[in-house]
Image (cartoon, rainbow, N blue to C red):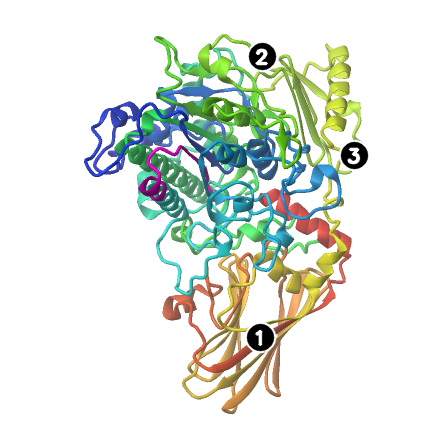
Amino acid sequence: MPATPDIRTNGPHRGYDGFAGTVGELASQSTPAWSTPVPAGAAHPNIVMILVDDLGFSDLGAYGSEIPTPNIDSLANGGFRFTNFHSAPVCSPARAALLTGLNPHRAGFGTVSHGDPGFPGYRLEIDDEVPTIAEKLRRAGYGTYMVGKWHLTIESKMHDGADRSSWPTQKGFDRYFGSLDGFTSMYAPHRIVRDNSTIVDDEAPGDAYLTDVLTDEALGMLRTLRANELEKPFFLYLAHQAVHGPIQAKPTDLERVRGAYEHGWDAVRQQRFRRQIDAGLFAEGTELPHSQVAPWDTLTDDQRTLFACYMEVYAASVIALDDSVGRLVAYLASTGELENTVFALASDNGGTAEGGPDGTRSYFSQFVPSASLPAEWDRDVDRPLEHIGGPRAHVHYPAGWAQSSNTPFRQFKGSAYAGGIRVPLILSWLKGLPKGDGDSGVRHQYAFMTDLHATLLDLAGVESPERWRGAPAPELDGATMRPALADATAPASRTEQYVEFAGNRGLYADGWKVVTDHKRGTAFDDSEWELYDVVSDPTEVHNVREQHPDIVAQLGERWNRAAWLNTVFPLDDDGSLLSRRPEWHARFSQPVTLRPGLPTLERYRSSCLVVMRDFDIEASFDWQPGNRGVLVAHGDQGGGYSVTVEDDATVVLAYNAYGRMYHHSVPIEKRGAQVVRLRATCGAAFDWELELSVAALTRTFGSVPQLLGLAPYTGISVGIDRGGPVDWDRAQRRGTDAYTGAELSVRITPGKESPVSRGLLARVTEATGRLAD
């Protein structure tokens, strides 16, 4: 086996303002003359909370990775690394627990935030009676800022006419910039909100990379604060979209890791595990679980080349995260505030296997988990290697790399095993949490995401309110981790914690853990429980259920008690619960008329008009020779369609089937008023028959795969193709290509639902959302 390239030292790290040193060195630098530092004796520390999406336990250098993350590692070296920190199996529940300090179901987030089925544990929005950490800190005098992923608002309330009461600025944040949705493209975000308004950008996407954009916005908020308030402490919640799929990266970062993964995922996993042992994260003798994926040496040469490319993209996106942290650290050092700033960095759940065993270059076609799909359904539309990582391809890495990301644990995001819920947590506060001599900063005490909420409040010197909006405030489920920060041998503040997602159950109690690997459609009974002694067996290798039936019974009963107390029931393992939508959603399936100049119709609002049903689009406009441009566009490079007028007096339908393009055209035969119609009729196999007509001339085209689940991801634009383009080649020639004629109006009329049962289709959509969260 060839020697492993050490990409951690692949060239000098890109510093900021000419600096490439450690946190301590940054803190010791003299303050530039132009800055006005906050006095060192400020009463409350600043807080920077960084939450990374789908980052595996071992993906940072401080946790064993080969990926160069010097800025994050420096925070870890100057602070504390937790090896036994836990989150929820998926993102919305984790984010709700962090922001509210309540267990996920008790906060109303038993699953990802898509639709409210009407049960207390699945409200999927933060109740007004529940104060967030931003509201608590703001009441204590903090400036509160958020950038990045929210995903705590149900889909039907994300559009521009919606009730905004669950949006970030109504939940305690003074300023917000980011995506309310679960994820987005790193090069062409489908919808960005600033404070309470959608940003409308009619320019074609450039080279801006979302991780950098979010960091720019965060720094801008902090600079604006300091220009107006010299001593006001701030709380910055930076919720990065990366490394959630589709994974994309900057060319400069990709060049740093080219060739680094040709030796494969088995070797990477072993090497990370060895570094973890050497760093004291786990004891000698800890076992690495049996691999769940195909051995690297059994793959074909073409597979190894492609799969290594996927991991290069993932690693490059982590490098961009580290650079973001470096920029924040450098700014705070320049203003003299670094030493009095608490940094917390964690992942929302374990690394994800949603890319499947082979990965995918067509992200949205991968997430249609229905046995009813035709055999020819393509979950991985071929793309050239050079497109992988860039804006043209929506990709995700294979499960083999996700297993490496979760080293040394088993299973993945969505699971109640450690691979789904045991995540990295770094805490650093140079002034308030100095380490003693000889203290490695490694902490093995058990903790949960609610405890991080309590800890940040404790470090800020802010108490959680006893009353909120005239009523008793809910009691926190979290407990401060300060004792563990002060003493590596202190007992954990928490001794018990339940977990549940999609029927997968688990409970940790006093060093024992019961967990289920629930099979969809089977009974939820005690025979599912497995038992692990996670003190001696942290990687959950040895199921000791048969040796300790009394402990299994006791912990199973404790899980039931916790479930009742936290409104976990009813359990749902197939999405049927979440397919329930309130009756008022029916209004989203009424015809809509759109005109140029309006913001792009939001993703979910757009999908209600076309997805899983027949639909008609009628565009009325004036055409004179020389007029050209987009009539209507819906979607992006992940899937969609557009209708355009071309220079040769033709109307062209471009249909992007998850990366495979279809083009059809019909001529315009006379100048003046025009009516163009696109009709889509559902077939019986998740396909559409397409018909395009201009005036009386009609042409019918063959069937194409329907756009299902979360595609089209970018919503409907009229008179322009905003965001990621549907047709890449055309966009390279024409950009967003606004229509140059007059009097354009587009009416979208939803038709009958697919002949496939509505219940099945709803479950497909919900399962898609849960997979892709």
Instruction: Mark yes or no: residue 407 visible.
Output: no
Which quadrant: the C terminus?
top right
Q: Nearer the viewer, residue 453 or 303?
A: 453
Q: Quadrant of residue 50?
A: top left
Give the side of residue 337 with respect to residue 456, left or right. left
Structural crowding at the residue carrying mark 1, measured as other residues with C-alpha within 10 Å and reported as few (<14), some (14–19) or many (≥20): many
Give the side of residue 518 with respect to residue 176, left or right. right
- Where residue 234 appears, as percent x and y from the top left, is 41, 35
Which of the marked residues, 2 or 1, is nearer the chain's N terminus?
2
Question: What amino acid type is highlighted by mark number 3?
Answer: Thr
Q: Nearer the viewer, mark 2 or mark 3?
A: 2
Callout 3: helix, strand or loop?
A: loop
Q: Is residue 718 magenta?
A: no
Segment colored magenta = 224-240
Q: Nearer the viewer, mark 2 or mark 1?
A: 1
- Where residue 680 appears, as percent x and y from the top left, is 65, 70
Q: Quadrant of residue 91?
A: top right
Question: What amino acid type is highlighted by mark number 1?
Answer: Val
Residue drawn at x 60%, y 62% as measured from the top left: 606
Q: Nearer the viewer, mark 1 or mark 3?
A: 1
Q: Is residue 238 magenta?
A: yes
Q: Which mark is residue 522?
A: 3
Give the side of residue 229 with respect to residue 649, left or right. left
Instruction: Mark yes or no: residue 150 visible.
Output: yes
CA–CA distance between discs 2 and 3? 30 Å
Question: What amino acid type is highlighted by mark number 2?
Answer: Val
Which of the marked residues, 1 or 3, is nearer the chain's N terminus?
3
Residue annotated with mark 2:
535
Q: Which mark is residue 746?
A: 1
- Where residue 68 appears, as percent x and y from the top left, is 34, 31
Asked if 272 appears above or below 771 in the picture, the reply is above
Callout 2: helix, strand or loop?
A: loop
